[in-house]
Image (cartoon, rainbow, N blue to C red):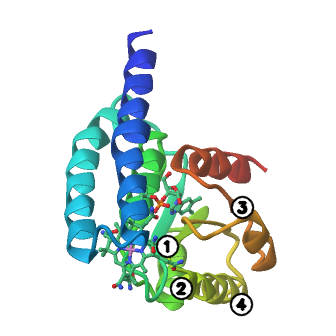
Amino acid sequence: MVRFSLIAFLKTILNEGLIGAMDEVGKKFSEGELFVPEMLMAAQAMKGGLGILKPLLAEGTTESKGTVVIGTVKGDLHDIGKNLVAMMMEGAGFNVVDLGVDVEAAKFVEAAQANKAKVVALSALLTTTMPAMQATIDAIKEAGLAVKTIVGGAPVTQAFADQIKADGYSDDAPGAVELARKLIAA
Ligand code: B12
């Protein structure tokens, strides 16, 4: 009971405090009211907040549910959403191999092979880097890996995920965890 309410509390901090504030920053950037330095400051604050939440969310999980390789695709430096997905995956008991940002397709393939990953999770925040998701999924299929691919990030949609033949899409981090669970069980 206590654990349940702690998780609900952490989710409120995440969704209403951290992510809500970041949405506001994005809106103000679009409207020309904030600029890249302010976005960077907001990103630093978000990272600090996530650093505090991460150990609390991971508490109490023991047995690994399998390995998830995650990264932001080639050309893209945004990592807040990716970090959030990684953190929630860890919290849910997955072993997470985080390749960071600006990750080449070949690196995803290599890491998935080396770590016997069950899921490869790709993040992209720019419309210009969405094609790198397609290139990565193509490379994974060409390598013949028995791994499920999931995609996400603000510009990504279910239709785009279907188009590039990803196994799954979610618009948020808890959804990403659910997807990974379902795909592994299937
Ligand atoms: C912070 C930020 C930055 C920071 C990034 C810092 C960092 N360490 O990440 C900095 C300042 C570096 C930056 C740079 C740029 N940015 Co920027 N940035 C943002 C901003 C404000 C917030 C992004 C964010 O972190 N959101 C919060 C997280 C939690 O949300 P999220 O990433 O969407 O993730 C959630 C879901 O999408 C999902 N998810 C994410 N990944 C995955 C993966 C999987 C597998 C799954 C299932 C789900 C999933 O779960 C997450 C949690 O719920 C957005 C605006 C916005 N509101 O999106 C612009 C935005 C993405 N940036 C934009 C732009 C244009 C740029 C620059 C080109 C600016 C410039 N002129 O230099 C550069 C690009 C640099 C590069 N090559 O990548 C545009 C993109 C426009 C477009 N359509 O392509 C946006 C939309 C701003 C705007 N309104 O114009 N940016």
Quarter residue 54 falls in: top left
Quarter residue 109 falls in: bottom right
**Disc 3 to disc 4, C-alpha distance:** 18 Å
Kind of residue sitting beneath label 1:
Leu
- Of callouts 2 and 4, which one flags the residue occurring earlier in the amino acid sequence? 2
Mark 3 Cα within 10 Å, few/some/many (few <14, many 20+)? some
Residue to which mark 1 is pinned? 125
Mark 1 Cα within 10 Å, few/some/many (few <14, many 20+)? many
**Residue 74 higher or lower than 91, as above or below:** below
Residue to which mark 4 is pinned? 142
Asked if the residue under mark 4 is in contact with the one under mark 2, i.e. CB atoms within 8 Å, the reply is no
Residue located 54% across and 46% down the image: 65
| Mark 3 sits near ligand 1, with its Cβ under 8 Å away | yes
Kind of residue sitting beneath label 3:
Gly
Residue located 72% across and 83% down the image: 141
**Disc 4 to disc 1, C-alpha distance:** 25 Å
**Disc 1 to disc 2, C-alpha distance:** 7 Å
Quarter residue 44 falls in: bottom left
Is residue 30 rendered to the left or right of residue 135?
Answer: left
